[in-house]
């Protein structure tokens, strides 16, 4: 019953004020049309990317782990997609993009007090990012120039790898310093042991075990021949072997261990150098942005419709208030 009365009231209201409703509607349509032509024209461009698997370059491409490496050509899963989205949404990417394309000036925010706040506000207007149902990311950009809109979208995609590299740079730098220092220390230690062994070689100690075996044979022959001179010469050598042989064995064994360590640490150092200087792309570009000369914004019919509806709602609100005021009087 109340719905019927309300409908009847609105019908009577429209009939009694039809002239004003039509006039306001026409004015609203003309106003919306004027506004839609005064608003700046913007063009849309878009790019679509799939996430790639996130791997260390050295682990994936260099490490000799045959049969167990991950496929670096594989499309990423949901976790990789979320990581990629976080990089695209990051404030660092916004700032890098603004600096590279001078968006501070283009978006007229360079002299603002709250510069970064306005950058984020403009970003929300000019850049739209969607996660599709197919596990991809659609990036739409808008600009008053179709060429700039395409450049804007493609530059965002290009900067993703820079964000990844910057994000891991400090961690890689710290790890590289640790391994690099150990690498230098290992080389220095090997050189010191080589120098010590060279000193012992000058004293006639070349290979303790082999020299002891050779001494035993030569000494036995000298005794058999009753060669006193040879015996004294061999006894002098034995004295040196007894005096420096232990040191030679120690240095020789340590040198062998450090050489084995050097092989491992050198391999690790080379791996980290690769990771420090290279980043595998974190995305597959399915569709590169190209200039689109079809106007995208403003949507003129939508502007006109909003102006029309807003005007009619205001008019009806005024008429209802006026009607109630007359009733109370």
Image: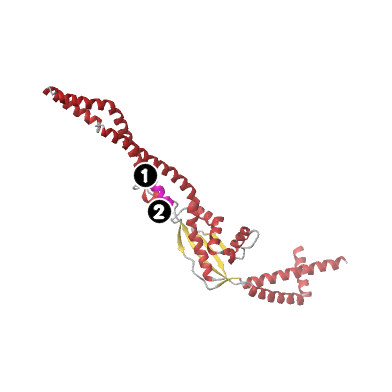
Magenta stretch: give its range.
267-278
Q: Characterize the magenta stretch by its predominant secondary structure.
A: helix
Looking at the picture, does residue 237 appear above or below residue 157? above
Location of residue 105 (image quadrant):
bottom right
Residues at marks 2 and 1, CA–CA distance in whole angstroms: 25 Å
Q: Nearer the viewer, residue 203 or 322?
A: 203
What colour scheme has been applied to the protein in the rendered image? secondary structure
Q: Residues within 10 Å of mark 1 (few under 14, many from 20)?
A: some
Q: Nearer the viewer, residue 81 or 166?
A: 166
Q: Is residue 222 left or right of residue 104?
A: left
Can residue 250 be spotted in the picture? yes
Residue 275 % position (x, y): 42, 50
Query: In the rendered image, which residue does mark 1 sit on?
Result: 266
Q: Residue at x 69, y 76 (%)?
A: 30
Disc 2 + disc 1, Cβ < 8 Å: no
The stretch drawn in magenta includes residue 228 = no
Question: Mark 2 or mark 1: which is in front?
Answer: 1
Query: In the rendered image, which residue does mark 2 sit on?
Result: 72
Looking at the picture, does residue 92 appear above or below residue 263? below
The circle on residue 146 is none
Q: Nearer the viewer, residue 232 or 103?
A: 232
Residue 47 % position (x, y): 50, 64
Location of residue 24 (image quadrant):
bottom right
Q: Residue at x 48, y 60 (%)?
A: 158
Q: Earlier in the sequence, mark 2 or mark 1?
A: 2
Q: Nearer the viewer, residue 42 or 130?
A: 42
Looking at the picture, does residue 219 appear above or below residue 14? above
Location of residue 303 (image quadrant):
bottom right
Task: Count every numbered label the image shows and give the total.
Answer: 2
Label 2 element class: loop
Q: Is residue 217 left or right of residue 33?
A: left
Q: Residue furthest right?
A: 329
């Amino acid at each position: 019953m109340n719905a019927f009365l309300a409908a009847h009231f609105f019908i009577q209201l429209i009939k009694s004020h039809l002239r004003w409703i039509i006039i306001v509607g026409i004015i609203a349509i003309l106003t919306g049309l004027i506004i839609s032509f005064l608003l700046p024209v913007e063009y849309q461009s878009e790019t679509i990317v799939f996430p790639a698997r996130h791997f260390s370059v050295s682990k994936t491409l260099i490490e000799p782990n045959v049969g167990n490496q991950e496929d670096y050509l594989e499309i990423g899963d949901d976790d990789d997609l979320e990581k990629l989205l976080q990089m695209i949404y990051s404030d660092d990417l916004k700032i890098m993009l603004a600096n590279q394309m001078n968006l501070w000036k283009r978006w007229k925010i360079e002299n603002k007090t709250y510069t970064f706040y306005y950058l984020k506000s403009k970003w929300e207007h000019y850049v739209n990012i969607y996660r599709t149902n197919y596990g991809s990311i659609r990036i739409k950009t808008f600009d008053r120039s179709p060429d700039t809109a395409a450049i804007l979208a493609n530059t965002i995609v290009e900067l993703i790898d820079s964000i990844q590299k910057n994000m891991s740079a400090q961690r890689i730098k710290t790890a590289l310093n640790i391994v690099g220092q150990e690498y230098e220390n290992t080389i220095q230690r090997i050189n010191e042991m080589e120098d010590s062994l060279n000193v012992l070689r000058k004293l006639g100690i070349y290979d303790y075990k082999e020299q002891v075996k050779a001494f035993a044979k030569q000494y036995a022959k000298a005794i058999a021949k009753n060669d006193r001179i040879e015996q004294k010469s061999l006894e002098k050598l034995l004295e040196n072997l007894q005096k420096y042989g232990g040191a030679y064995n120690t240095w020789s064994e340590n040198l062998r261990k450090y050489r084995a360590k050097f092989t491992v640490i050198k391999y690790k150092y080379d791996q980290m150098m690769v990771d420090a200087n290279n980043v595998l792309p974190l995305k597959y570009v399915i569709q590169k942005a190209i200039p689109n000369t079809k106007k995208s914004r403003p949507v003129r019919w939508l502007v006109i419709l909003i102006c029309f509806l807003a005007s009619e709602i205001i008019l009806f609100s005024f008429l209802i208030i006026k009607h109630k005021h007359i009733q109370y009087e």
